[in-house]
Every structure is written in C-alpha cells, then in structure tokens.
Amino acid sequence: MRLFICFITLCLALPAHADGFISRLLNKPVPGGVAVVDLGAEETAPSVRYQNKPVLVIKEDQQRWIAIVGVPLSAKPGSQNISVNGGQTLTFQVDNKHYSEQRITIKNQQQVNPNAKNLARIEREMAEQTRAYQQFSPRQPSNLLFDKPVNGPLSSPFGLRRFFNGEERNPHSGLDFAANSGTPIKAPAAGKVILTGDYFFNGKTVFVDHGQGLISMFCHLSVIGVKVGDELLRGGALGKVGATGRATGPHLHWNVSLNDARVDPAIFIGAFTP
C-alpha cells in the first residue's frame, strides 16, 4: 500500500506531458526570443494569432500541437496573450534579458546620417523587406534545429544596442558570422526564395521562406546565387559572404523572423545564451 501511495504521489507531481525536443530547443521566452505554447491534442491544427499576426503551429512528437511564437525585442517582461481559433486566449510569460552595447565606426557618413535622396531609397527598400517578413505560407518547416549557414565563429550576437559613430541606432536584429569573402552560404532549412536585392544598408540580400512565417534573411553578400521563386533544399547554396552595404568587413548577417518578429537565430542552432 505504501508503495502504491508513493507511485500515485509521483504521478501527481509530474507534468501532464513532458516537453518534446522542439520545445526544449526553442522555448526561450525573452524579448527577441521564442515562446512555445502548448495547444493540446486537437484533431486538426489550431489557428493561432499573436499581436494580430498568424503564428507557426506544429505537432510535437505526433501528440500535441504547439504554437511557436516570435517575441519582438520591444516586448516587455510579463504576461503576453495569444488567441486560438479566434476565441480562446492563452497566456505565456516573457522573462527579462539584458543585451549589451556595440560601438561601431563607419567611414561613410551617409550610412549613419543619410541625405534626403538616400532616405527615400531606404524607405522604399524597408517597405519591400517588411512585406517579405510578413509573408505567411502554409508549408511546414523542414526542420527547426537549423544548420549554421556558414562555417565560421559567431561574431556580433543578436540584440546588441548599436551605436554608429557615437549615435544610437536600431538594435542588432540578427547574428553575425565571421567568414572570409566568397565563403559559400547554405540554407539552414529548406525554403523558397521570396526576395533578393541590393540594398542601401543590407547590401546584397536574400530572403528565404521556410514556412508559416518562419523566414531567414541573409545580407552583405558578395554574390547572390539564387532568384525569386527558387526552391532550396536544406544545405542548398544561396550565395557567398561579402561586405556589401553597411559593413566594416566581410561577414554574414543572418536574421530569423517569426510572425514578423525578429528573433535570436542562436536559438535555432542551439547556441542561445540566457
């Protein structure tokens, strides 16, 4: 009887289900991070929205649906809500995270304080790239443990408060890899090329849609090796490392976006630092 009571007590102390691999990998609920929210074992995939934008939903371990929510850097620590199937509200908690500063010296003053002509160009380019980030295709991502897009050490991390020539600008929205010019860049997961361009700040750039609002952006390329509409396999070549746009030297800047929120790519390669 005592053994039976101990068994029942242990069962009650355990969670209703154990987190699967994807939850353990991705659930980093901080500003600029990812929140994984349990949606239960519905027969069909629930429809989820966060801040009125559609959210990636997958089935984990063939059992329960989970929402994978991109938390913007602007989010405040505390409670956040998602809506499920247009009615039910679920809450998740956002924890605090401190991001360091980065100070960069740029020789070209136009890349710090652009003139009116360049500002007009920047606005056009930002609108084009914003539309790409807001795309939401029905395809399921091929993998959520991403491959590194280049073989090279991480240099500038995500979320840094950046100062160019002493003037504060937007936080660092991606992850930088130190790599020589001409180093091949590979798709971290399968996807479709949805935008390419040569932009004022980003230089030569490629956007890849991995499915359901999960989008990668690669910039400062020396060579773009794909065109809009191309389907890339995981590991497929998409271009080469360069130093185009606002860059002080050759490197790859890689953005990951979820539900139109830029999140830390390090989460997806198992290199997140709390």
Image: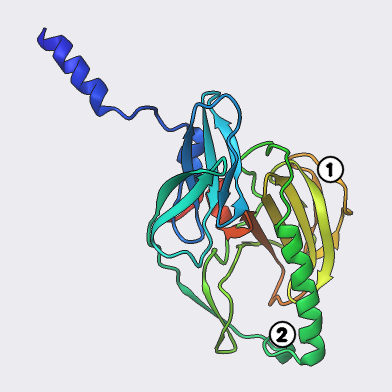
Outermost residue to the left: 2
Relative height, residue 162 to residue 36 (above, below): below
The residue indicated by pointer 1 is 231
Instruction: Please provide percent x and percent y for residue 101.
Output: 48, 76
Q: Quadrant of the C terminus?
A: bottom left
Quick one: label 1, few (<14), some, or many (20+) residues within 10 Å? some
Instruction: Please provide percent x and percent y for residue 231.
Output: 84, 43
Q: What residue do we see at 88% from left, 49% from top?
A: 229
The residue indicated by pointer 2 is 111
Instruction: Please provide percent x and percent y for residue 265.
Output: 58, 54
Q: What residue do we see at 62% from left, 85% from top?
A: 105
Relative height, residue 168 to residue 215 (above, below): below
Q: Label 1 sits on what residue type?
A: Glu
Indicate the quadrant where residue 132 lies: bottom right
Indicate the quadrant where residue 78 lies: bottom left
Q: What residue do we see at 52% from left, 71% from top?
A: 160
In the drawing, does residue 204 fall left or right of residue 257?
right
- Judged from the image, the secondary structure of the residue bearing numbered disc 1 is strand
Can the viewer see residue 111 in this picture?
A: yes
Return the residue nearer the eye: 266 or 28: 28
Instruction: Please provide percent x and percent y for residue 124.
Output: 80, 75
Q: Label 2 sits on what residue type?
A: Gln
Q: Quadrant of the N terminus?
A: top left
